[in-house]
Amino acid sequence: MAARLIGITYYPVKGCAGTPLTAAALTRTGLPHDRTYAIADEKGDLRWQWGDPRLALITPELTDSGELILKAPGSPPVRADCPADDGAVNAWLTDVLGAPSTLVRSPAGNGNRLHVVSRSSLDALNHRIRERGAAPVPLTRFRPNLVVDGWAAPHTENSAASLRIADAELAFTEGTIRCAVTMIDQSTGRRAGPEPLRTLADHHRADDGGVVFGAYFEVRREGKVQLGDEVLLGDEVLLRAEDPGLLPGTRRPRRP
């Protein structure tokens, strides 16, 4: 069975809910508008989900004209410019998150990679989680940009040096280091641990000890992709770790 692209998602505001797409242009800087914005606290530090789980409940929407609209349960939508001249969006964020918050532009280079996860990797992980008597986790816990289905072997995204999707070509850069955000239920905005991090820590470590699931790729050749496109593996394959406790094909993982 051919591997196919079954998911395309970008995240206009870092840490907030993603926006699914049926097609997208992959550029040298990744997915357009991915993590363009972020939310800062009163000290100017960027908020992240483990510290502020309710970020997951904020749904950003970019209109065709490029206007950003923020939505959250129990709050009216707010139209946001960045920086907001009248402070309305910051007041809205402060009310939703329960602490002083400001919409800011993400640091340069924050969204120039694509996070790729495969369905076979999730299925293998959930099999191990079920064996422990715990409930399986959805793909949303890992906040991927691209989801591939059809690879027989789990973690193929970590052993492929390159991927080709339609006219676009992607080059592997590193495994995706995982953190406590994977224990946030993206549908409720609440901490739900200890899975999947507990099982990942036992079975999916890089050779430097980082807990890994999924992989980062950079765009080597730009092109438009759409759901259902075939995903082809490059000829080269990264060396696999000899230690069976290590995740194959990983190197220098960083926290997303």
Image (spheres, rainbow, N blue to C red):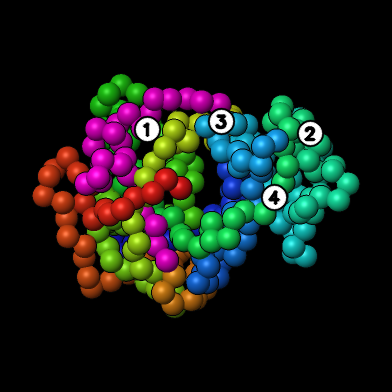
Q: Which of 186 and 130 lies nearest the eye of the viewer?
A: 186
Q: Position of residue 78 (x, y in %)?
A: 81, 44
Q: Which residues are magenta?
A: 190-218
Q: CA–CA distance between discs 2 and 1? A: 31 Å
Q: Position of residue 27 (x, y in %)?
A: 52, 71
Relative vertical location of residue 14 with respect to residue 179 in this rendering, above or below: below
Q: CA–CA distance between discs 3 and 4? A: 18 Å
Marked residue nearer the N-terminal end (1 or 4): 4
Q: Mark 4 and mark 1 in contact (Cβ < 8 Å)? A: no
Mark 1 belongs to which amino acid? Answer: Pro
Q: Helix, strand or loop at disc 2?
A: strand
Image mark count = 4
Lateral position of residue 13 relative to residue 93, left or right: left
Q: Residues within 10 Å of mark 2 (few under 14, many from 20)?
A: few
Q: Mark 2 and mark 4 in contact (Cβ < 8 Å)? A: no
Quarter where residue 67 is shown: bottom right
The residue that appears at 81% across and 50% down in the rendered structure is 84
Q: Which of 72 and 245 lies nearest the eye of the viewer?
A: 245
Q: Helix, strand or loop at disc 1?
A: loop
Q: Is residue 244 visible?
A: yes
Tell me the residue that label 1 is attached to. 196
Q: Position of residue 193 (x, y in %)?
A: 43, 25
Q: Position of residue 82 (x, y in %)?
A: 76, 54
